[in-house]
Amino acid sequence: MILLWNDTFISEDELRISKDDRGYHFGDGVYEVIKVYGASMFTAEEHIDRLYESADKIKLIIPYTKDVLQKMLYDLVETNNVIDGHIYLQITRGVVPRQHYFPSEGIEPMLLAYTKEAERPLNQFEAGVKAKFVEDVRWLRCDIKSLNLLGNVLAKQEAHEEGCYEAILHRGEKVTEGSSSNIFGIKGGVLYTHPADNFILNGITRRVILQCCKEIGIPVIEEAFTREQTLAMDELFLSSTTSEITPIIEVEGNRIGSGARGQWTEKLQESFEKKLPQAIGI
Ligand code: PLP
């Protein structure tokens, strides 16, 4: 497999990561995951825009234009002959002996991108998954797609240990998002989801879903709902680049709605599917 290392394509065995990389010491960097369908990147511009926004929020300057980066990613997908899968891309503040404050000028950020072949989890899109509530103890800048994911990792592990696919995070009673996804509820034909503020990552899939809602005519209320309201939803689902729209059918032993994928979730999946570079069929 070929990797993108700064602006150079290298083989995996040529990769040398320094002990002094600030990503290693501090998680001082940002990342993106971009899905590839039928050899085409999906919503690449949106992901690249968000990468630059995240970088800007941590005062990290990416030393390429967005167009140059997009072209390098396009070449990476082509070189690795990825048909269905995704790109993982991260950029750290660079290599400098460990000190908390930023390095002085002249230290270049370190970019690494690789591809992964992965089939779409079609069974899961239909069968749905189980989830568990976990208190959201992360920091107050969850809008940044930061490499610091310890809060997310600990929440996911807690859910995983209970046989659940996702942790539904909540601050007090209010549900924020999943440990690696956004959370949506449908009640009486209305879609509810947390507003895109500093408590959640504004998912690219979330944005596509809100567009689908507009097109289908599903009213949307971007307002946080409580744990109690979560359990009383007719339908519940999560979204992310790799999980797309995945129904949540059970939360801590409580069946959501009928305990199976709901009709609105299915409609949204169909609408989402139509936007993919190549319709593959659910
Ligand atoms: N929220 C968190 C915490 C995430 O880690 C992710 C994706 O990894 C998302 C939401 C969904 O974002 P996207 O749809 O852009 O993949």
Image (cartoon, rainbow, N blue to C red):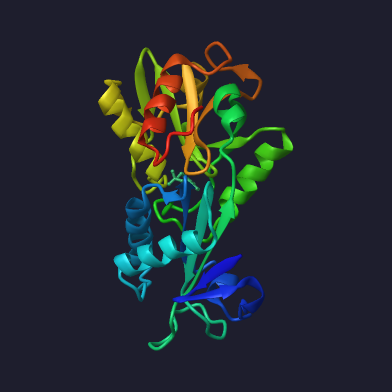
- Please determine whether, in this image, residue 198 is positioned above or below residue 246: below
| Residue 176 at x, y percent in the picture | 45, 38
Q: Quadrant of residue 128?
A: top right
| Residue 7 at x, y percent in the picture | 44, 76
Side of 12 relative to 199 (left or right): right
- Residue 172 seen in this snapshot: no
Q: Quadrant of residue 51?
A: bottom left
Side of 39 relative to 57 (left or right): right
| Residue 190 at x, y percent in the picture | 34, 19
- Please determine whether, in this image, residue 108 is positioned above or below residue 223: below
- Residue 11 seen in this snapshot: yes
- Please determine whether, in this image, residue 24 is positioned above or below residue 177: below
| Residue 161 at x, y percent in the picture | 73, 38
Q: Looking at the image, which residue is at 55% across and 68% down?
A: 3
Viewer-proximal residue among 222 and 121: 121
Q: Looking at the image, which residue is at 41% across and 25% down?
A: 270
